[in-house]
Image (cartoon, rainbow, N blue to C red):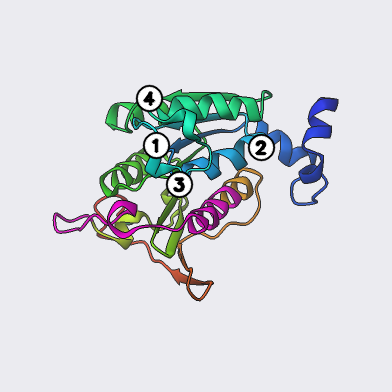
């Protein structure tokens, strides 16, 4: 049962027939791990905290720098030099005191994956690091946890929901890991803030729909082009010889 305070607070989403009181209760009983509190992690965590996700774990070992402020909307000038996950925990707790928020001042690694994945219902990839994305992909497959990938550089972005336990393709099926992969990120290619907002909005929307039992887009890579302001959807097939899920 929702309390009268919760009814009031989340009223505008409870009134949606696709959410309702039962959907709100599902959100409140859910745990989500957000890996990376940069340009994607900031808006994703804000929207999910606002929506009343019961427990958010945010993980990032970096400190806030002045170059982050152009797009990492949770941080301001007073936060420079402080750990992103700890600052995020404080700000998100101010946003919503009804929920539980844990900040982890560490880069995501094998140890954290083994400790945290059995506890969470969903992982959201908000990193700009390929090695970490492959690590999440492997562990989410192993622990049968859904993973929502997001990435954005310059004027384009992409997102993909992965549920290998439901028979869908994984990140490795799409982009097999190799030594030759060139790391391209905001540092090398630049990024415009609103592109991150768009991709983060898609990630948060997918998370809410998934947790409330609404239809989601499996086995699809969704690409956004900021110049034409259009989305393109590419259907994916699980690869029988995939090193992770095959
Ligand atoms: Zn695969």
Q: From the top left corner, tell me how far across and down residue 21 is, in percent.
A: 79, 38
Q: Are marks 1 and 2 in contact (CB under 8 Å)?
A: no
* Image quadrant in which you'd find residue 43: top right
Mark 3 or 4 closer to N-term? Answer: 3
Quadrant of the image for the C terminus? Answer: bottom left
Mark 1 or 3 closer to N-term? Answer: 3
How far apart are labels 1 and 3 at the CA level?
A: 27 Å
25 in relation to 164, above or below: above
Tell me the tag on residue 105: 4
Quadrant of the image for the N terminus? Answer: top right
122 in relation to 148, above or below: above
Mark 2 or 3 closer to N-term? Answer: 3
Secondary structure beneath disc 4? loop
72 in relation to 60, above or below: below
Q: Which of 142 and 120 is in front in this view?
A: 120
Secondary structure beneath disc 3? loop
Secondary structure beneath disc 2? helix
Q: Which residue is drawn at 44% across and 38% down?
A: 37
Mark 1 or 4 closer to N-term? Answer: 4
Q: Which residue is drawn at 46% across and 37% down?
A: 34
Q: Which of 2 and 66 is in front in this view?
A: 66
- The residue segment tinted magenta is 177-205
In the rendered image, which residue does mark 2 sit on?
50
How far apart are labels 2 and 4 at the CA level?
A: 22 Å
In the rendered image, which residue does mark 3 sit on?
39
How far apart are labels 1 and 4 at the CA level?
A: 23 Å
Please tell me whether residue 67 belongs to the stretch shown in magenta.
no
The local crowd at label 2, few if under 14, some if 14 to 19, many if 20 or more residues have their Cα within 10 Å, is some
């Amino acid at each position: 049962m929702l309390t009268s305070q919760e009814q009031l607070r989340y009223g505008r989403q409870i009134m949606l027939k696709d959410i309702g009181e039962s959907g709100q209760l599902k959100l409140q009983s859910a745990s989500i791990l957000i890996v990376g509190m940069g340009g994607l992690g900031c808006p994703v965590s804000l929207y999910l905290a606002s929506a009343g996700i019961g427990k958010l774990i945010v993980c990032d070992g970096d400190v806030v720098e002045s170059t982050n402020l152009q797009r990492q909307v949770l941080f301001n000038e007073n936060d420079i030099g402080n750990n992103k996950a700890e600052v995020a925990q404080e700000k998100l707790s101010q946003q919503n005191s009804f929920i539980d928020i844990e900040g982890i001042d560490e880069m995501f690694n094998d140890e954290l994956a083994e400790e945290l994945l059995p506890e969470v219902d969903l992982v959201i990839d908000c990193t700009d690091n390929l090695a970490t994305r492959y690590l999440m992909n492997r562990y989410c497959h192993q622990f049968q946890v859904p993973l929502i990938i997001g990435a954005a550089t310059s004027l384009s972005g992409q997102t993909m929901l992965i549920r290998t336990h439901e028979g869908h393709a994984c990140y490795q099926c799409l982009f097999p890991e190799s030594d030759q992969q060139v790391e391209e990120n905001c540092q090398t290619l630049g990024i415009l803030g609103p592109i991150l907002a768009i991709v983060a909005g898609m990630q948060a929307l997918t998370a809410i729909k998934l947790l409330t039992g609404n239809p989601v887009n499996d086995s699809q890579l969704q690409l956004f082009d900021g110049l034409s302001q259009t989305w393109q959807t590419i259907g994916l097939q699980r690869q029988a010889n995939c090193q992770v899920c095959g």
